[in-house]
Amino acid sequence: MDIESAKILGMALAVGLGVIGPGIGIGLIVAKAVEAIGRNPEAAGKVQATMFIGIAFTEALAIFALVIGFILKFA
Amino acid sequence: MRAIMAEESIHISLSAEQIGTFFGVPVTNTMLMSFVVFALLATLAFFVRKNLALIPGRLQTLIETLFVGILDYMTETLEDAKLARKLFPLILTIFLFIFTANIIEFTPGIGSIGWTHEGGEFTPLLRSMNTDLNTTLALTIIVFVVIEVVGVATLGFLRYGKKFVNVSSALGFLVGIIELFSEVARLISYSFRLFGNIFAGEVMILVIQHFVPMVLPVPIMAFEVFVGFMQAAIFSLLTLFFVKMAITEAH
């Protein structure tokens, strides 16, 4: 395998494997947030705010995988 | 076979194409697009301002409802009416800027009008604004500076700095380091989130146009407009929440 195809494979693997964890994580966060809103609809605004912060932190991990992918491709 | 494949392959450019220079400053097509968005928003603001009436018309009602709703939500989240009033112009401008750019992304002419170089490479005159990392990074830096400045201005330098350098205990010090890291990593995650989402949408539409050019791109484009709205909302909402986190004292 030459270095170019290894780079492309590595990039695809990095992104593909890297989004598994954050995908599960965001699913859990949103599931719990929906549950919480269902139990206490008045607190919807506060739950949503916390949910978005949680999603932002979790999604950042997937974005790091994407950045690694770009680095592999172009560096 | 190989030659045919190469001829038909899709051209995807990660960076924006330069279309000219303005007093020595290189002008890219995404930059031109951001000025188009700017002009659109300025025109809208001008017309609404000109036709301002005590009995509001349809447009004025829409805009007033939108603005008041957002301001109310900000006040509720920040629990500080004065700070919400101060931050309102910035957050709403960021939202409208990104949202307008994403909405007009699929207007006929954007991305399709341009010229071809000798090498057969196509340069569009206008290109969707957020498919350039420079645009999103600029927006991110603005937001980052605002968050830090609001944090320092509200809590004071020492109390704000205590979030990151905490020498009261070993665990506190470690948490401070992690906080500092996530604060800086925000620059990357913020800009790449917006860039990645919009760029992935553009690439997906290109690929689908390549395989099924007739009907299929339409629902995908509708979905991408929805994604564009969501990303604009998330960008401004996260700014709001991070300001909230910055003005809340560490405990």
Image (tube, coloured by chain):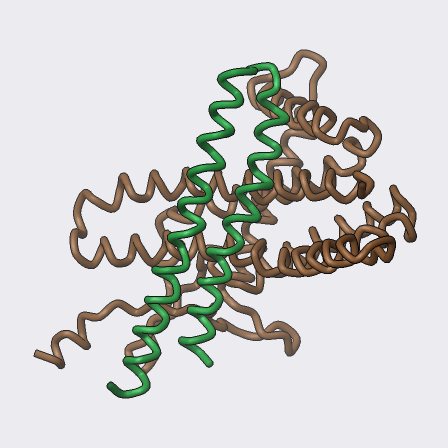
Rendered image quadrant of residue B7: bottom left
Rendered image quadrant of residue B225: top left
- Identified at 22% across, 70% down, the residue is B9
- Identified at 49% across, 30% down, the residue is A32
Between residue B236 and residue B35, name the one nearer to us: B236
Q: Is residue B65 visible?
A: yes
Q: Does B116 sit left or right of B190 as displayed?
A: left
Q: Is residue B50 visible?
A: no
Between residue B39 and residue A19, name the one nearer to us: A19
Between residue B179 and residue B137, name the one nearer to us: B179
- Identified at 49% across, 36% down, the residue is A29
Q: Does B147 sit left or right of B189 as displayed?
A: right
Task: Provide residue B192's location: percent of width, then percent of height.
Answer: 52, 58
Judging by colour alone, the chain drawn in brown in this rendered image is B
Q: Is residue B40 above or below residue B174?
A: above
Judging by colour alone, the chain drawn in green in this rendered image is A
Residue lying furthest left: B1
Task: Provide residue B22's location: percent of width, then percent of height.
Answer: 62, 72
Q: Does B170 sit left or right of A34 as displayed?
A: right
Task: Provide residue B232's location: percent of width, then percent of height.
Answer: 54, 42
Q: Is residue A29 above or below residue A58?
A: above
Between residue B13 and residue B152, name the one nearer to us: B152
Q: Is residue B115 above or below residue B239?
A: below
The quadrant of the picture occupied by the C terminus of chain B is top right
